[in-house]
Image: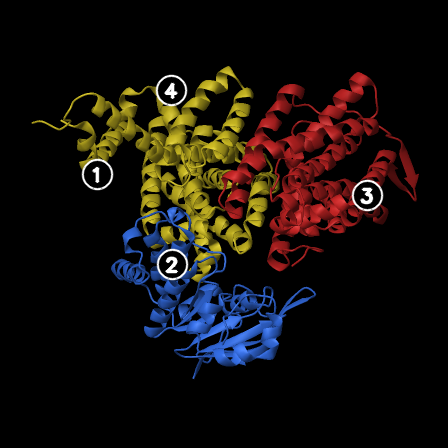
Chain colours: A blue, B red, C yellow
Amino acid sequence: MPILEGQDVTKYFGGLTAVSHVDFYVNQGEIVGLIGPNGAGKTTLFNLISAALSISAGEIRFKEQKLNGLKPHQICKKGVSRTFQETKVFGNMSVLQNVLVGAFFGSPNRVSGADAAREATQAVDFVGLSAMSATPIQDLTLVNQKRVEVARALATRPELLLLDELMAGLNSTEVSEAMELVTRIRDTGITIFMVEHVMKAIMGICERIMVLHHGEKIAEGTPREIAANKKVIEIYLGEETYAGS
Amino acid sequence: MIDRVLQLIITGILAGGIYGLLAMGLSLQYGVCRVLNITHGEFVMLAGVLTYTISTSLGINPLVAAAITGPLMFVLGFLLHITLFRGLKTRTPSPAVFEGSALLVAFGVMYVILYLGKIGWGGLPMPIYYLNKTLHFAGMTFFLNQIIAFAIAVAIGVGIYVFLSRSRLGRAIRATAEDPATAGLMGVNVNLILAFSFGLGAFLAGIAGPLSAMISPPKTSMGFSNTVIALIVVVLGGLGSVPGSFIAGIIIGIVSFLVIGLWEPVLTVPVYYAILMILLLVRPAGLLGKK
Amino acid sequence: MDITRFISTHKKSLLVAFLVLLLIFLTTFPLYGGVYHVRVLIAVLTFVILAASWAMFSGSTGYMSLAPAAFFGLGIYTMCVLEKELPFLIIIVIGGLVAFAFALLVGLVTLRLKGMYFAIFTFGLVVFMSELINYLEVALTGTHGWHITPLGNTTIFYTMLILAVVTVLAIYFIRRSRLGLAMNSIGGNEDAAEHMGINTTRVKVLTFAISSMFMGAAGVITAPILIYVNSSIAFSTYYSFMPILMAVFGGMAYLYGPIIGAVVFAYLERIVRNEFPDYFMIGFGIILVVVILFLPNGLVGLVPELRGKLGGVIAKLRKGGQAEPHANT
């Protein structure tokens, strides 16, 4: 049963078509990858789902409910949360406070101080940052700041988590750790939709992959199918991406 | 009655030329440097009172004085940017914080210039009417200087438009306004372009000063209202659009003279604000601004 | 006895003791202070309210309002209009509500949009109010200006003191509340805040309106000091500039930053205004610029830095002195 569905999703920026008539679906409990060259429209699609941008045409449905016209904070409260390509942490707060924001405001009901604190601490533990709870987030490395973003998103108790280039800038070990984190998140019952360039991660943990190019969906399938897909190979020609099938 | 209204409208159109010039300068400074320069009006004031000093002590007319005040304001703006705003940019963690802090810096500078002006030139209006000849046309009265000012303002506006769209420097400025990081990667000296653009905006204020001074006496308190007008014209016309600035300038000019002539001079700013409110509710991008 | 250790373990109770003493000092001040100093203190309290309220919204969300003077002036005029109709205390509340409503309107129009529009709108707002009121008072009453019956210095002092305490307490509790967390996250990263479930427009508008409420109330209390009021006296950009200078200097992200800034500059202003009229404003403008460039967290923001350096100095002194530094009985 698709938890997230998009039909004919389109976005125009003046004369430019960033996303063009894309249909997509994500099933409950899946980890779905979204790949494509730079400028393919991946982050734009995420921005349309989370309502950071307004959709030009088409429809996006979450658990059968139309998301068109809703604001980001409303979508968050419905159960969709995300991280950002350029890490958007709250630079003026500590790690725990960052995550507390998600805990307090991510739920459609009023959350008590005690519950929020518990939720936040759990999320911080989940991503492995309990030792740095009180540290000002400015003092953290990029890797750890990304983890805080994940913890913050988790604290909003999402059913669907959008991860936008979580692995960008990570070294090989960090990528493996991140892959393990993502799998652990899915194992708690959260559906994952992830934009990624790091092929090791995409091929490693995604059950299904969608490929965008110039705003259009050009392929969709299992990692094996995608790795063998001629069109996909063509557009990635010259890039060192995946190590064989 | 009709020719009275017509006269007000045409006078407003003529005044709109200077307003458009003002707005263009501000638009450049915010559009490229992301500094909402609320001292813009004080630069106009400074240019205006300097025009008075220059013309009375050297005996030259305001139009020639503009050739001095224009470049002078350019240098002032350029220096202001490389000392204060560039320094601020390196010390602020994010663009949002930069804009807020830059605004406060501009607020502080505004008071410095304002009071320097007050101390240097006092509070009284300083008449330097130039080209005051009245012209009569179809039962209406106009002043030659209003027409000349309008013509010069439009000429400069066209010049700036051509400069921005055709020249290499102009393209570099537009690229920096669009995306400084990418522009830098493509070989643009971003810091220099930013300071230059800020100076260019100040240059326009430096021209607007003498143009306005030859029509109505400059005084040290004129800065604030000029800034208010510039801000409203920028929003109405749309940030970053040269033709937008002039169209909006003309509209505001017409509105202001109609209000002064038919209603109450003191209500000009409230009327501007009513327009501003409607604009912000309906189309914040302005007439020709990008959405 | 080790002073530094004593201070750190008893920090909270020392702070409370200090505040209680301060309050006692302030409440009894009119008895021995003398008229001049009472008036200065009234000015200090007024600026404490204005600076702290400004910082509550602009310091946390990063949306710079240039319009405190507009709400302050609105309060002054509320007093002018209602002076003969209602008791003073009621007018104070109404002044606050009028400012709240007006700020709500301004916020609903501008805070849905980017910060630039808010700044532009608030910049000319003081002039807008001044001219509109100018027109209305002539149109409705036929004259410019109002004469207000003066109230005794002590009455004004105590009302302003109470308002200041109420304001500071309110800000203290708001900062620790959910609303305060939401405000800070908007200042931290507005996009992210919106995506974590915060209705940023609502938070901004509400906070802006609350902060303006205190400014309006302070205006009501100020009117009887001015005795004669007209639209240019009531709506002066000076009352936008000074609170901002004070809050930035003291530290606009903190509660007591604006308070310290208000005390410093309210006294400073009294001194330099007589010696160097007009020149002192140039100095203040320069100070504002310098502080933003070099001391963006204000004086209070300097404390963690200083504490670190001071701690280092103390440690060095200890090492150089005794062999075994410890507290004895």
**Horizontal arrangement in the rendering, residue B97 relative to residue B280 (left or right):** left
Query: Label for residue B282?
Result: none
Residue under label 4, please give it: C36
Q: Which circle, 1 or 2, is nearer the viewer?
A: 2
Residue under label 1, please give it: C12
Disc 3 sits on a residue from what chain?
Answer: B
Tag 4: residue type?
Tyr
Residue C11, image x, y percentages? 21, 36
Number of numbered callouts drawn: 4
Name the residue nearer the viewer: B178 or A211: A211
Tag 3: residue type?
Gly
Query: Label for residue A147?
Result: 2
Residue C164, image x, y percentages? 35, 37
> Residue extending furthest front?
A244
Name the residue nearer the viewer: A235 or A150: A235
Q: Where A12 falls versus C322 (above or below)?
A: below
Is mark 1 in CB contact (under 8 Å) with mark 3? no
